[in-house]
Amino acid sequence: MSEEALPNKNLRIDGTRLWRSLMEMAEIGATPKGGVCRLALSDLDKQGRDLFREWCEAAGCSVTVDAMGNMFARRPGLDPKRAPIQTGSHLDSQPTGGKFDGAYGVLAGLEVIRTLNDNGIETEAPFEVVVWTNEEGSRFAPAMIGSGVFSGTFSLEEGHGKQDKDGKTIGGELTRIGYLGTAPLGHPVGAYFEAHIEQGPILEADSKQIGIVSGVQGQIWYEITLTGQESHSGTTPMPVRRDALVGAAGLIEAVNRIGQAHEPGGCGTVGMLQLHPNSRNVIPGKVFLTVDFRHPSDQALALMDQEIRAESRAIADKHSLDLDLQKIWSFPALEFDHDCVAAVTRATTQCGYSNRAIVSGAGHDAVYLSKVAPTGMIFIPCADGISHNEIESATPEDAEAGCNVLLHAMLAMADRD
């Protein structure tokens, strides 16, 4: 279909309304530095969900919730037998998160619905805006559990059983905040699009307004415990110590070295560290830490996996420590659906935005949706590439541009034969 033949090709969303919604959502869990803290299934997460439901119902959508707390706001289509065209993201945040990560994708979807309503446009397929549960994985590990259960990657029992550091479970917290839904788990999806800030510096550095996401790099998460022996810091000679923190220090350096050795593209991060007994005059007897490896090449990621296992064993042996290494989560590098990527490309060109192809360095719910539906993503720049940080920032103009692309990509997939 030529650009001239595309229906509604001059249709645009209301950027001011989108921005106002983003700022109002950002008031829930607002932090002093301008970010948000809405941990998954907290009272603040419930407030955000409640506001989203209110807005969607006001826009004429029916809202259902499944047993993982995933929320689905549906605008009917002319053909109720057609699988919905979905878009969405998440409303939960990091402890010191930004106001755009996740929320932008959810509210961009809502703005698409509002724009169709304003212009009296009916689509063949229904449209559905989704809030996925626990995308961040900061309170309950691993990440993307809600979309993982929806796609069949995790069982409902696995999802409900995940615990936070205080032993509270996802199932229990869903019940507590009133979001343990009854809608069936999983349903057909015609196509899924997710709009998101890039969370990196590439678009801004290249002066491009839209990132056409071709895929996502692979990822592995580990939980590692090193166990030695706590003893007195002043009376235990250095040669006989079994200092778990010294071992952990070597392991942290090894993670960084492995990430650097697999450049370009390799990333290695230790993001969480807990030591016991955490007393100033006691040699640490146990250290728990997390490792996050990422790479766009599955072959390189497999090598990184081999290297961290070998390094961990050597460090434990060197310092007479017991080692427990668990790979708790992983997914391979993936390419998004050709037709969805093409729809995003056509929409970007149609709207006249500068753009470039890009691979996502972060995991998103789109990873698991790609297992059950044709999937694509749209990126917009964020200032200095900073995300998972309270100073995370995007512009109203870029937010509007990404939402316009989302609108036209969804329309293209909804009305195709």
Image: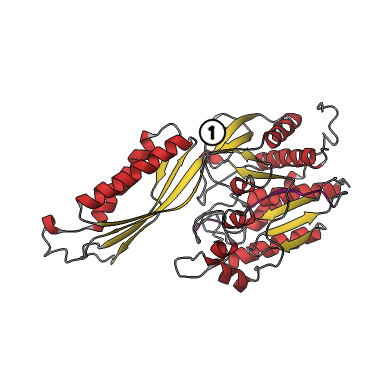
- For the record, the magenta segment spans 81-95
Q: Can residue 253 be seen from the camera position used here?
A: no
Classify residue 38 as left or right of residue 182: left
In the rendered image, which quarter is residue 325 located in? bottom left
x, y (%) of residue 143? 53, 54
Figure label count = 1
Q: Quadrant of residue 72?
A: bottom right
User: Of residues 168 and 27, which is closer to you in this image?
Assistant: 168
Q: Nearer the viewer, residue 166 or 110?
A: 166
- Which residue sits at x=29%, y=65%? 276
Residue 87 is one of the magenta-drawn residues:
yes
Label 1 sits on a secondary structure element that is helix
Does 82 sit left or right of 204 as displayed? right
Q: Is residue 214 above or below residue 131?
A: above
Q: Is residue 308 above or below residue 68?
A: above
Q: Position of residue 51 (x, y in %)?
A: 70, 62
Q: Which quadrant does the C terminus fall into?
A: top right
Q: Is residue 358 magenta?
A: no
Q: Which residue is mark 1?
A: 202
Q: Residues within 10 Å of mark 1 (few under 14, many from 20)?
A: some
Q: Residue 394 or 186: which is nearer the viewer?
A: 186
Residue 93 is left or right of residue 286, and the answer is: right
Q: Main secondary structure of the magenta part?
A: loop
Q: Position of residue 17 (x, y in %)?
A: 74, 49
Q: Is residue 311 above or below residue 70?
A: above
Q: Position of residue 191 (x, y in %)?
A: 72, 44
| Amino acid type of the residue tagged 1 in the rendering | Ile
Q: Residue 389 versus residue 375: which sits nearer the camera?
A: 375
Q: How is the image coloured?
A: secondary structure
Q: From where the camera sits, is residue 175 visible? A: yes
**Quadrant holding the N terminus:** top right
